[in-house]
Amino acid sequence: MRKLPLEKQLPQVSDLVFGCMGLGGDWDPKSAITADHIKIAHQAVDAALAIGINLFDHADIYTSGKAEKVFAKILKQRPELQREIYIQSKCAIRFADEQYPGRYDTSPTWLNHSIDGILNRLQVEHIDVLLLHRPDPLMDAEEIAQTLKAIKASGKVSHFGVSNMHLHQIQLLNHYLDEPLLINQLEINLQKLDWLEEGVLAGNTQGSHVNFTSGTLEYCQMNNLQVQSWGSLCQGLFSGRDLSEQPESVVKTAQLVQSLAHKYQTTCESIILAWLMRHPARVQPVIGTTQAARIKACGAASEIMQQLTRDDWYSLYVTARGQALP
Ligand SMILES: NC(=O)c1ccc[n+]([C@@H]2O[C@H](COP(=O)([O-])OP(=O)(O)OC[C@H]3O[C@@H](n4cnc5c(N)ncnc54)[C@H](OP(=O)(O)O)[C@@H]3O)[C@@H](O)[C@H]2O)c1
């Protein structure tokens, strides 16, 4: 059995994470949470629990705070859940307002304001993990370390991680932190392939367009940092979405995913996730669908990951990149 890097801090954490970005309706802060939003959230959480998921990924910005608020309603109706699941949220992105553009903020004032807002919307006193959502050019690592230490001491958060950061930013933060960061959540999947291209095109002119910081995955592996993937299902691109406007490589990849689903007697979703999880970084995919049937379709991913052959893994990779490897 493969163990995830964060298993020590979050015992028996699931191989998959449920991403709550789609809960709570639209992103208009003025629109209200409806009975329908609550029903969808209940069904999605039920489906996630049914396939063994016990880590739920939030962010203070998701649907302008309504994702966390809707989740609070579920926790209120089912208080036992709080003992059975892990909750993760993110902060440091600020929406544009009348005066200023959308921006990032890792100042002590904003971080403290954010964690209090998260706990308030979720109606809990503590969450398991808090991630810094995006790298802030003005981040002062020493100041962040002191702030996170105080937040942890207050009992509001147990562990910290980051999202969308490269190894140098993580190294900088870790230099000042008492406890190393636990998680890095990145956009890596079967469609956005730069995380693999960076390695296979090292020193090759074909790699000049690649946008993924060299060594980030290796750093995470060497330092037992959990890599989580967002966009893990590629927004349905290879599992049923309309492909009429898509390039040939996407159409061929979707066909291959379907034929592998047939070969392994599983679903397209489980093939796509198993492909991600097969990487030695022990990727923990975050799935963002709100549809119970699609969540259920992800349920065989761990099992398929153990069966997926090297050759099939490469067939998917090469088909998705649209040309032979150098
Ligand atoms: N750290 C970050 O910066 C960051 C950024 C974005 C997201 N995230 C996290 O990662 C999670 C997943 O990300 P994601 O939502 O971008 O990726 P995803 O899981 O690849 O895609 C989910 C989206 O694709 C749609 N979808 C899935 N299968 C479909 C199909 N067959 N046909 C049509 N639509 C389909 C879903 O709609 P339905 O709900 O209708 O199925 C949903 O809107 C989020 O919930 C969030 O927790 C993190």
Image (cartoon, helix red, strand yellow):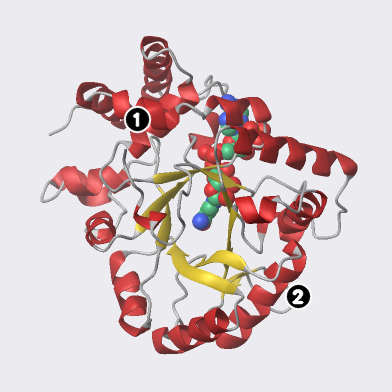
The residue nearer to you, when weighing 10 against 161, is: 10
Image quadrant in which the N terminus is located: top left
Location of residue 96 with respect to 67 vertically, above or below: below
For label 2, the residue is 98
Q: Residue at x 42, y 16 (%)?
A: 261
Q: Residue at x 56, y 77 (%)?
A: 105
* 209 sits to left or right of 232: left
* 162 sits to left or right of 21: left
Q: Which mark is residue 278?
A: none
* Alpha carbon separation for disc pair 1 and 2: 48 Å
Would you say residue 246 is visible in this rendering?
Answer: no
Distance from mark 2 CB to nearest ligand 1 atom below 8 Å: no
Quadrant location, ligand no. 1: top right
Amino acid marked by disc 2:
Glu
For label 1, the residue is 305
Would you say residue 251 is visible in this rendering?
Answer: yes
* 238 sits to left or right of 212: right
Q: Quadrant of residue 92?
A: bottom right
Mark 2 secondary-structure assignment: loop
The residue nearer to you, when weighing 198 against 50, is: 50
Amino acid marked by disc 1:
Met
* 318 sits to left or right of 49: left
**Residue 302 on image: x %, y %:** 40, 32
Q: Quadrant of residue 79?
A: bottom right
Image quadrant in which the C terminus is located: top left
Q: Residue at x 32, y 53 (%)?
A: 211
Location of residue 291 with respect to 177 vertically, above or below: above
Give whichever of discs 1 and 2 has the lower sequence position: 2
The residue nearer to you, when weighing 261 against 316, is: 261
Q: Quadrant of residue 218?
A: bottom left
Q: Residue at x 33, y 64 (%)?
A: 166
